[in-house]
Amino acid sequence: MVLLFARFEEMAKKSSKKPEIASVNARQKPGNKTPCPPEVSLQQGIRLRVDTLLPGYIWVIPNYFSESECVQWIRYMEDSNASYTQQRSTRIMASRECYRHSFSDADVAAQLFQRLASSCPAALQLLPQLTALACNSNLRMYKYTKGMSFGKHVDGSDVVAEGVTRMTILVYLSACEGGATRFDRPDGQREVIAYPPTVGSLLLHLHGDDCLLHQADAVSNGTKYVLRTDLVYPHSRA
């Protein structure tokens, strides 16, 4: 039995209209052939809420990106030299097929974190006795077209300059049919938690030793675009 959250599905359907893609990147300088990632500005006076999908494990922040921001990030992904990735399932590797673009940008990571801190400070306090310090500057983008998916896996934790990553951030840039992020429950129950791609929403989930087994369902229609980073925390609890 699959446990889907009706209000999240309703949000996804409302956002299913495919946005028009702008022809020029917002930060692209004339004569510069290398695309620049869009800037993430502060949202003065905006307060966003955190919805809990599974206490202690999975949360969602609706409308973290606007539709126009999602369009800019999709354009950046399309303008970048994304690589096609295909991995067959093995004993230690999950099956995966998608287009991937990764880049390191401390400025964009700082902007993502500043928006989170200013518009949804509660998101920095989700872990007991720990406060998030930054977003990981290792940024990744994924594009899944019809039939593409990512098999069951866990996300590892990384030690970075600011501390250690403990939480995955996924920002959904588009809606599609299929493509849900699906989590097994920690108690072994047969019901799973599936979150459908919803334009502009940000999903957070624990990773490292506390990561739930999860997967990205195959896209059945449309295209799924996702931006990924991580929340960085101190090495030890206060």
Image (spheres, rainbow, N blue to C red):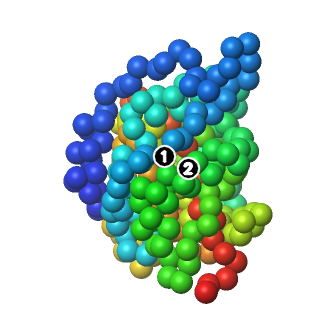
Work out whether 154 lies above or below 100. Answer: below
User: 162 or 1, which lies in front?
Assistant: 162
Work out whether 154 lies above or below 72. Answer: below
Whole-percent x and y of residue 5?
26, 57
Dot 2 or dot 1: first in sequence order is 1
Image quadrant holding the N terminus, namely bottom left
In-image side of 53 versus 183 (left or right): left
Mark 2, residues whose alpha carbon is within 10 Å: few (<14), some, or many (≥20)? many
Q: Amino acid at mark 1?
A: Leu
Mark 1, residues whose alpha carbon is within 10 Å: few (<14), some, or many (≥20)? some
Task: For marks 2 and 1, give the one nearer the viewer.
Answer: 1
User: 85 or 166, which lies in front?
Assistant: 166
Image quadrant holding the C terminus, namely bottom right
Of all residues shown, which one is farthest toward the bottom? 238
Question: In the rendered image, is residue 200 in sight?
Answer: yes
Whole-percent x and y of residue 87?
67, 44
Which residue is the site of mark 2? Answer: 112
Residue sitting at x 36%, y 62%: 50
Which residue is the site of mark 1? Answer: 42
Residue sitting at x 73%, y 45%: 104
In-image side of 86 versus 61 (left or right): right
Whole-percent x and y of residue 119?
42, 55
Cα separation between marks 2 and 1 = 9 Å
In-image side of 2 versus 217 (left or right): left
Q: Secondary structure at mark 2?
A: helix
Work out whether 97 lies above or below 205. Answer: above
Of all residues shown, which one is farthest toward the front? 44
